[in-house]
Image (cartoon, rainbow, N blue to C red):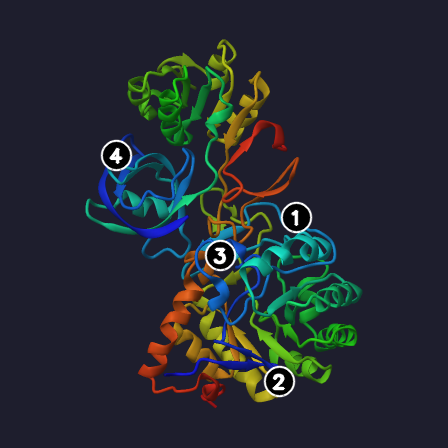
Amino acid sequence: MVNTKVNLSGIMLDNPIIPASGTFGYGYEFAEWYDINCLGTFSFKGTTKDPRFGNPTPRIADCTAGMINAVGLQNPGVDAVISHELPLLSKCFHKPVMANVSGFSIEDYAYTCQRLDAQPQVGWLEVNISCPNVHGGGMSFGTSPEAAAEVTRAVKAVTTKPVYIKLSPNVTDIVSIAKACEQAGADGISMINTLMGMRIDLKTKKPVIANKSGGFSGPAIKPVAISMVYRVYEAVKIPIIGMGGLSTAEDVIEMMLAGATAVEIGAANLIDPCAAKNIIDDLPRVMEKYGIQNLQDIIGGAH
Amino acid sequence: MTQGFYKVVSNQQLTSNVYRMVVEGDTSSLSRPGQFVNFKIDGLYLRRPISICDYDTDAGTITLIYKVVGAGTEKLAEAKEGDVFDLLSGLGNGYDTSTSGAAPVLIGGGVGIPPLYGLCRKLRAEGKQVKVILGFNTKDEIFYEEEFKALGAEVFVTTVDGSFGTKGFVTNVLSDLDYTYFYTCGPMPMFKAVNAASVTSGQFSFEERMGCGFGACMGCSCKTKYGNKRICKDGPVLVKEEIVW
């Protein structure tokens, strides 16, 4: 029997598979397809201080081996997430869950993180400083080491649970930003968010997406993610949650070899609602194929 | 909602760019007319949502009518008998026939017409008097006039260029009809005209670019008078009173 358990900042996960924020709602949409308690955990829809409708539609465009989204952090706001969504989530998922947080100011981030940190089912906070689809916030905090460190310090000052900072690949040097987060007290790094992308409709001769550009994700970005995780792993000591175009058990192992302690599955959930479950079911077979007994042992194995 | 493999029974051209595909497979998650399926198509990343024209639980078949508008539907049009597709089925809320009254009118524009066929069959089975207005640009685009008549509906056809039926738009006919309720599917300009011309409540089936098709990604959200809704999950059918134009 192979062992798929991994330790993520002191909490043992049955397996390293974590559906990514924004592709898994609050879990109950997927509980209609399978028992989501097979997951290591999942990162719920990005939460902001106030409710947000997000961007105008169209918000989605198809690409070769991927997709672009510009949802724009639609969510009901932290009050409604706590009063309405988390109780529904707890009915179908009985493990610690990852709370994903976005903001438009340092104070926003601190406030929302503090509120969610106090929720018993929340096991980790994942702080998104890398959303490419909102203006006046989001990614701007994730594009300089100083701003990333400032958010990290503000969140760490008001929370007790492990804090993962979710980084943008849309930067010159992701390593310096990861190091700044580590020095500011982050418990881990979550990477990578989507790459900036655009499609133009040849009939209308205009961008497909109303927001013009959006975040590109899917299998096409996997090599970018592997490379970035590999480099950050060499520069920081804190754990990394790796993501970017992963859709098979082989992809999971590849990302862990690059340096990820756990992995997130994003766009694949939207194509196949059972994608995360299928990966979990297939993981032991692929581990055996490559002679892996303990998944935890292969983290960073490519270095 | 279910995921499964479906075999193409037939894939037939109805007009220059409209096709009818019949697939064989699980129909257990279908409960109402106006629901849709989401096609996985080789070589394309996102699935492609296609509205259901009709389904037959005894035969285990689903009929889909689609217009070739882009890369996804171009590939669908090439499908041959015996080809197999991975589909998500039973998606969307569908039309509610309980509010129709005794004599509803169905208003379809172009490729918005197909889901009204299954709806018409259900309303007729419930013993209702059904009128149908089918709007096209021109005579060559007309499809399913005879099929609606065969269900016992009173059918009116409009063409924008006057080459068949009443010249003009569906609302030219709607204004002269008596009806207890309406159901519509078609392009947005038609929706706005129907909303303005209609004298009863009714249901509109919307279209939007979708990511997942089952309520996860928030790609197809819209604002309504009662809060945000996802076209794929809370829709595609919305009632007149909740729609923000």
Residue placed under numbered mark 2 in the picture: A238
Disc 4 and disc 2: Cα gap in Å?
59 Å
Q: Are marks 4 and 2 in contact (CB under 8 Å)?
A: no
Using the image, determine if residue B172 lies above or below residue A167: above
Q: Which of the marked residues, 3 or 2, is nearer the chain's N terminus? A: 3
Element at label 1: loop
Element at label 2: loop
Residue placed under numbered mark 1 in the picture: A53
Residue placed under numbered mark 4 in the picture: B13
Depth check, mark 1 against mark 3: the one in front is 3
Amino acid under label 3? Phe
Disc 4 and disc 3: Cα gap in Å?
36 Å
Q: Which of the marked residues, 1 or 3, is nearer the chain's N terminus? A: 3
Q: Which mark is residue A30?
A: 3
Q: Position of residue A92 (x, y in %)?
A: 54, 59
Element at label 3: helix
Determine the residue located farthest toward the bottom in the rendered image.
Answer: A303
